[in-house]
Image: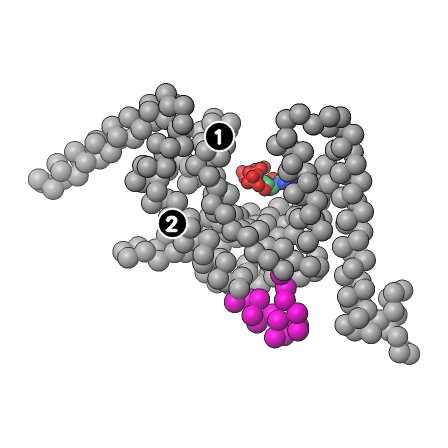
């Protein structure tokens, strides 16, 4: 009974603290500084960091095994990042969601982000499939911008995954966004990103049109490079026939 009263009291104090925090955030010129110092927010970010480490380790384990099976590494690099508090606040505000730790966790899929850069498009799908098939991973969403590129030419495979993290007294599923791209797609996306964030660009429409053209070139180049790699690995000719005689089996 006394414990219940205590629990009720601390819940009330939590709510009051949350309201006070939201008010301070709304009034402050640097809300990210306040959010950074808030304990529940810090705990949330720490859980995302753990989830990111989990997925990154899974990818590195797959890399190890893949390189033995296929005699090459499925990816060139992995980059991990936690979304900055200021970007979290901006995205929540832009979408009109309340600024609470619970809402942040519920609404945003990309706080923990991993970018996997592969050499060839088929390695992207092979790696993504191997990851999704793991029985502790839940696939929340798959956006295939390689099969269906964005109108500006953006191409990547995006997965939203949930991965369990084991804390001292509980197990929590946390969301991690994994973006898979080829080196060429990544090269394109970084230039496109500059266009998005640079304010004083002259003739942005013309630049966007040039970027779209480059995206198409990159797409056929990725395909061509993959075909050449297949020819090197299997001894096929460029027109899809084996370099030896006899009928050709389909890839
Ligand atoms: P940053 O700075 O890279 O983090 P959702 O997150 O699922 O609620 P959203 O944001 O529409 O909805 O998801 P989507 O379309 O999957 O895109 C998320 C991320 O993909 C972006 O994150 C970019 O990293 C990347 N992306 C998507 N479209 C483009 C594009 O046209 N060009 C480039 N360069 N990157 C793109 P952020 O938060 O926008 O940016």
Q: Image height check: is 244 above or below 7? A: below
Residue 106: x and y, percent? Answer: 43, 39
Along the line of sight, the residue nearer the viewer: 200 or 160? 200
Q: Could you tell me which residue is drawn at 12 percent across and 36 percent down?
A: 5
Query: Where the N terminus falls, by quadrant?
Result: top left
Q: Is residue 177 left or right of residue 69?
A: left
- From this viewpoint, is residue 36 visible? yes
Magenta span: chief secondary structure: helix
Q: How is the image coloured?
A: one colour
- From this viewpoint, is residue 247 visible? no
Q: Could you tell me which residue is drawn at 68 percent across and 38 percent down?
A: 192
Q: Image height check: is 63 above or below 84? A: below
Residue 202: x and y, percent? Answer: 73, 26
Check residue 185 for magenta coloring. no
Q: In this view, does 75 lie to the left or right of 169?
A: right
State the residue position of label 1. Answer: 90
State the residue position of label 2. Answer: 47
Tell me which corner region of the image, top left, top right, bottom left or bottom right, holds residue 131.
Answer: bottom right
Check residue 70 for magenta coloring. yes
At label 2, counting other C-alpha atoms closer than 10 Å, the crowd grade (few under 14, some 14-19, many 20 or more) is: many
Along the line of sight, the residue nearer the viewer: 137 or 81? 81
Residue bounds of the magenta highlight: 61-75
At label 1, counting other C-alpha atoms closer than 10 Å, the crowd grade (few under 14, some 14-19, many 20 or more) is: few
């Amino acid at each position: 009974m006394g414990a219940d009263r205590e629990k009720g009291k601390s819940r009330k104090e939590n709510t009051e603290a949350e309201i006070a925090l939201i008010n301070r955030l709304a009034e402050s010129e640097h809300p990210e500084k306040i959010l950074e110092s808030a304990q529940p927010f810090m705990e949330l970010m720490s859980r995302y960091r753990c989830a990111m480490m989990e997925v990154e380790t899974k990818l590195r384990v797959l890399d190890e095994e893949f390189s033995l099976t296929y005699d090459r590494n499925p990816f060139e690099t992995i980059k991990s990042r936690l979304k900055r508090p200021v970007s979290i606040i901006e995205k929540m505000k832009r979408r009109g969601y309340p600024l609470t730790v619970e809402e942040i966790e519920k609404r945003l899929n990309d706080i923990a982000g991993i970018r996997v850069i592969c050499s060839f498009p088929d390695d992207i799908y092979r790696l993504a499939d191997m990851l999704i098939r793991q029985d502790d991973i839940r696939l929340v969403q798959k956006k295939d911008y390689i099969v269906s590129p964005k109108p500006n030419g953006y191409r990547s495979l995006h997965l939203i995954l949930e991965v369990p993290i084991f804390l001292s007294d509980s197990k929590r599923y946390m969301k991690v966004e994994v973006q898979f791209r080829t080196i060429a797609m990544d090269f394109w996306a970084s230039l496109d990103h500059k266009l998005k964030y640079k304010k004083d660009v002259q003739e942005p429409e013309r630049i966007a049109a040039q970027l779209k053209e480059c995206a198409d070139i990159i797409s056929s180049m990725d395909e061509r490079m993959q075909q050449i790699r297949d020819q090197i690995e299997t001894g096929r000719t460029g027109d899809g026939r084996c370099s030896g005689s006899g009928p050709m089996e389909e890839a």
